[in-house]
Image (spheres, grey):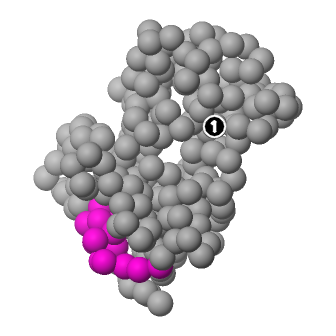
Amino acid sequence: MIFMRIKACVCCIFVGFIFVMPMPAISGFFSSEKDNNEASDVISAEDQADAITGGGASGEEKSSGEAESFVMDLSDKVLSIINDTNTSDEEKEKKLREFFVNSVDTEWMGKFVLGRYFRTASEEQKQQYMTLYHDYLIWSYVPRFKEYKGGSFYIIKVKEESSGNDAIVQTEMRGIKESPNIRVDYMMHRNGDGNFKIIDIVGEGISLITTQRSDFGGMISQKGLDYFISKLESKVNSLKKKSA
């Protein structure tokens, strides 16, 4: 078992936001009811993990060290930006936005989150949504580096799919003020350049993208895609204004 302590902790930027900093809602009036079609479109965090690594006996557990190195490098770089006393908060936020774009596959996530609604959307709706979703992720989390509370980051286990193109890095965050230890798993895949990128973050069994898929789909099924896109645009504008 891998049990490595990393002095750095990226909880406020890429992982701990699931519990330390909950996902900002697009609207405060999501219905708890989903139609039957929407319910069937939701994938559990366990199924998502199996889809990434091959699942059960069909997947092969191994570790080339590359996935682990990706997470460690991610942690070190983010913390070095946050702790740079010679850089203004404005410049730090700019650097972190660039780093987020290079580390997270927002395009893959956006398509997965919208699910069947993306497949039936017009080209104009797709383009609008993808731009807004990209901005939504960035402006929801990157500005929160100011709320960094410290802590330690442990890599517990690394599981790579037999092809080496997909991986899960299981971690635990400890020592965060006023918070219990938090289990956080990175779901990653290789992009066209052969580099790993994050495609999901699962905190204590709760998947970011499956939660979004359920919540977004609930609004779309009731109000329609155009309405949802307008609400997403309003939320992004609000987040940008708040960060200014």
Residue 127 sits in which quadrant? top left
Q: Main secondary structure of the magenta part?
A: helix
- How many C-alpha atoms fall within 10 Å of the one at disc 1: few (<14), some, or many (≥20)? many
**Which residue reaches farthest left?**
86
- Residue drawn at (43%, 39%) of the image: 108
Viewport quadrant of the C terminus? top left
Identified by mark 1, the residue type is: Arg
Residue 90 at what x, y percent from top left?
25, 37
Residue 16 seen in this snapshot: no
Residue 142 sits in which quadrant? top left
SS type, badge 1: helix
- Residue drawn at (76%, 25%) of the image: 29
Front in this rendered view, residue 3 or 108: 108
Residue 57 seen in this snapshot: yes
**Which residue reaches farthest bottom?**
1
Residue 35 at what x, y percent from top left?
84, 28
Residue 56 sits in which quadrant? bottom right
Front in this rendered view, residue 82 or 215: 215
Magenta stretch holds residue 226: no
227 to the left or right of 133: right
- Residue drawn at (79%, 30%) of the image: 37
Residue 213 at what x, y percent from top left?
63, 37
- Where does label 1 land, which residue? 213
Does residue 191 lie above or below 36 as drawn?
A: below
Residue 57 at what x, y percent from top left?
59, 76
**Which residue reaches farthest front?**
58
Does residue 197 lie above or below 213 as drawn?
A: below
Front in this rendered view, residue 76 or 49: 49
Magenta stretch holds residue 64: yes
Does residue 59 lie above or below 3 as drawn?
A: above
- Residue drawn at (50%, 33%) of the image: 111
Residue numbers of the magenta segment: 61-76
